[in-house]
Image (tube, coloured by chain):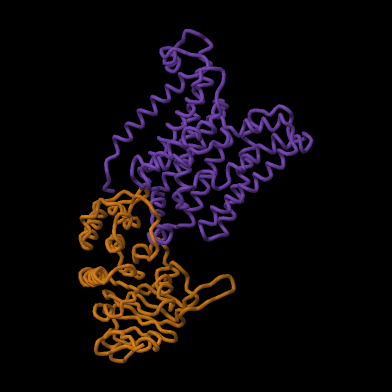
Amino acid sequence: MDNQKKNIILKTEQLSIGYQQKKDTQIVISDLNLEIEKGKLIAVLGKNGIGKSTLLRTLSKVQKAISGDVFYQQKKLSEISEKELSTKLSLVLTERLPESQLTVYELVALGRQPYTNWIDKLSEKDIKKIDFAINQTEINHLKNKRFYELSDGQLQRVLIARALAQDTEIIILDEPTAHLDLHHTIKIFSLLKKLVSETQKTIIISSHQVNLSIQLADEILLLKENNYHLDTPKELTKTNAFENLFSKDLVYFNQELQQFIIKDI
Amino acid sequence: MEHKNYTKHFIFLSVLLVMLFFVNISLGSVSIPFKDLLNILSGGIASKESWHTIILDFRLPKAITAILVGSGLSICGLLMQTLFRNPLAGPFVLGISSGASLGVAILILGSSVFGGFLVTNSVSNWSLPIAASLGAFLVLSAVIIAAHKVRNTMSILIIGLMFGSLTSAVISVLAYFSEATRIQQYLFWSFGSLGNLSWNELSIFGLIYGLGILATLTLIKPLNSFLLGENYAKSLGINVKKNRNIILVITSILTGVITAFSGPIAFVGLAVPHIARLLFTSSNHKILLPAVALIGAIVLLICDSIAQLPTSEFTLPINAITSLFGAPVVIWLLVRKKRIFV
């Protein structure tokens, strides 16, 4: 890793992630040493099953690390209570929301739960934060709709608004563009880019959009079978790090075009 | 939260509840003029001495029981549906009513199987609720211990159902070896009844009910976060496991005590949350909790009034009425709306 990183908000030391069931341990990635700076858009890329979701779930304490540590501003993740973590980190997950009649506004307002009193009363500050989140994500016209009436693209923006209302320094999104067409994918990416530059938040996103990530992310974390790279897209392209991201029998990475090209079949 | 104003809904339901309360008290095998009824309730003197006893010692406690049972079961139903994110869940999915039934079955049926050393022939007023409570408590403990071991909330649902099956099997075996009169006695208990409570019993029931409801109020926030699923709830700083256990304990105690005093009353707990969601078109528990309590009380008062309606000597079993009249209503509501929610 390069040494001139300042203002590090998230760090991992010798982190191994995977799944543990009784005595059966399945390690997906081992010995991750990452340093992530504040105010950056980080894209996590890698093929299916490489451990993108596992990594994001471990970073957000949804699941436990096998070994090693995660640090948020010097503090060990395992020592941060759920309550405290909820004011530092918010999530957008891939899982479907259970069916309910929540309105978009109510859903975004749930992001304020870490700050509300026992009966969930919204203060003036809460309402300001909610309005800010709704304006930033441009979902004002959807406010009174039920969330099940929304398209996938709209729902993603609502979920991002909810995370934004939670007012945390870090937002982690697990494949937010998985079900979206190119237009809506770009819309989400540019929204995240805008949020990073306007609010100084750190946003970590897993994706399959190699080309978009190269164009829009500040840094990319490339997860491969036996190693990983975390660097700026420019640097990664220069060192040809994308080269063996996917198995070479189908595609190759074209450095000039900055994208994968299908081999002649 | 920014939401529709539901004040009108709540006023309407409250007025309806009060009206039904008086209708319920005025109905019965002895007809008492409404003026005398009001006189008695306000502490005055009625035209006939016996009417005092009928109103104060029978009809009033029964109407209050109906309100407590109806609202209590419905709130438990709502808690279970939200916790399990399953519209088919109800207060009895944890096997609590089966446990209570087992307790009563052992008390009534067991005496003929085990040679009568368990109870004397006359089952006293208190032995039924105590047996039911013990049975409910037994199953509750088993479910909570099991819940502690499994991480997946859905597994608890299945474990509860399994305990239900187990206890039903035991009851079948007991019934098989019992005399016909005993079986009949058990059957009558399983029909459910709101009218068996003395003021003493009612005050104990009311106390436990009140504590349960107070505890439920502290759950509004976690319940709302559960609407997003457990992972989101956790990321909002909610202690999922702790709140899950609190919900289980409250539901078990409330349904346990309700079943102990009034028998296993079906349908209300499952259906009322759906009626409330349809009427209020909301999933917010700040609105749903009071709505469900009001509607539950109203539904059971109506059912009890119907059970009384043939102003004869007979009172139909409340359990039959709740399902007989309630099920078609809910089917109709759902077919019309086409979409169900948790």
Judged from this view, the residue extending furthest toward the bottom is A239
Judged from this view, the residue extending furthest toward the top is B47
- Chain coloured purple in this rendering: B
Image height of B29 relative to A230, above or below:
above
Residue B269 seen by the camera: yes
Image height of B312 relative to A89, above or below:
above
Q: Colour of chain A?
A: orange
Residue A172 seen by the camera: no
Seen from the viewer's position, the closer of residues A169 and B327 is: B327
Instruction: Tell me what residue is drawn at x 51 percent, y 20 percent.
Output: B310
Instruction: Tell me what residue is drawn at x 54 percent, y 42 percent.
Output: B253
Instruction: Tell me what residue is drawn at x 51 percent, y 13 percent.
Output: B51
Image height of A99 relative to B68, above or below:
below
User: Residue A167's quadrant in the figure?
Assistant: bottom left
Q: Position of residue A52 (x, y in %)?
A: 40, 75
Instruction: Tell me what residue is drawn at x 67 percent, y 28 percent.
Output: B124
